[in-house]
Image: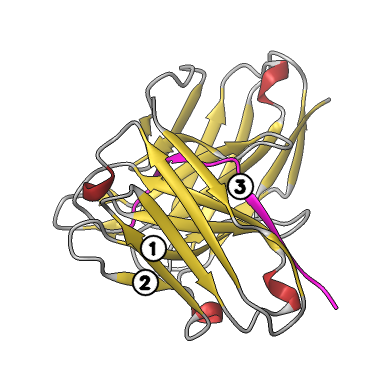
Amino acid sequence: EVQLLESGGGSVQPGGSLRLSCAASGFTFSIYTMSWVRQAPGKGLEWVAGITGSDNAAYYVDSVKGRFTISRDNSQNTLYLEMNSLRLEDTAVYYCAKDGTPLVGIEWFDYWGQGTLVTVSS
Amino acid sequence: DIVMTQSPDSLAVSLGERATINCKSSQSILYSANNKNFLAWYQQKPGQPPKVLIYWASTRESGVPDRFTASGSGTDFTLTISSLQAEDVAVYYCQQYYSSPSTFGQGTKLEIK
């Protein structure tokens, strides 16, 4: 059974930092592209970042480029999101999501974690 | 970036009736080399993560009831629920994965009339 378990969310002041983790199990983690998708309170879905399994190529939405870093540890089956210079508008539930097919770039997401809430507030 | 626009924003349908949600992309998401449309549909119920219903614009995910069908190509796509059930109350999103950044529609809230 595929499981994705996010952790690391919390409250932080503007300009602060957080590191999110996503522990994966139930599939061959290293061959799948993984993404972070966020959802601000009461709002829609926004893809934030993705990283391929094969060559660790990373992709970001413009609004987080230079502030967020996605990474993965295939030996620990864990996905990370390092978030720096956090802004009020980064407040959201952050979901870890698995690509639907292996060995390709960002596609549709067939499994999602339950999410972890990040609140940026002064 | 490709902008995904859904219509309507909200929809109220009677139980057993048909529900139709539209999604339009700001540019074609049909890849000519494999003739595939890079579009997925998701269902999100309150307090839950999204669940994929459809990918490649019309391929139903395993386990999704066959009352959910989807169609379209190029820039215009449709998700249809043939006979609305109470458990279908949710927000529905389309997503393009043709180019980075992958983008979602704003969502369509489906309720029972």
Give the spatial CA distance, label 3 vs label 1.
16 Å
Q: Chain of mark 3?
A: A
Left or right of B87? Residue A13 is right
Query: For mark 2, does the 10 Å Cα neighbourhood hold few (<14), some (14 to 19), or many (20 or more) residues?
Result: many
Label ID, residue A59: 2
Residue at the outermost left position: B33
| Residue B35 appears in the picture as rendered | yes
Q: CB atoms at circles 3 and 2 under 8 Å apart?
A: no
Q: Secondary structure at mark 1?
A: strand
Q: Chain of mark 1?
A: A
Q: Give the labeled residue for mark 1.
A: A50
Q: Secondary structure at mark 3?
A: loop
Using the image as rendered, state which of residue A118 and residue B65 is in the foreground: A118
Judge whether A87 appears above or below A22 on screen: below
Residue A107 belongs to the span the image colors magenta? yes
**Residue A97 percent across, percent down from the top left:** 45, 48
Q: What residue appears at the point 23 percent right and 49 percent down from the top-left corner?
A: A30
Q: CB atoms at circles 1 and 2 under 8 Å apart?
A: yes
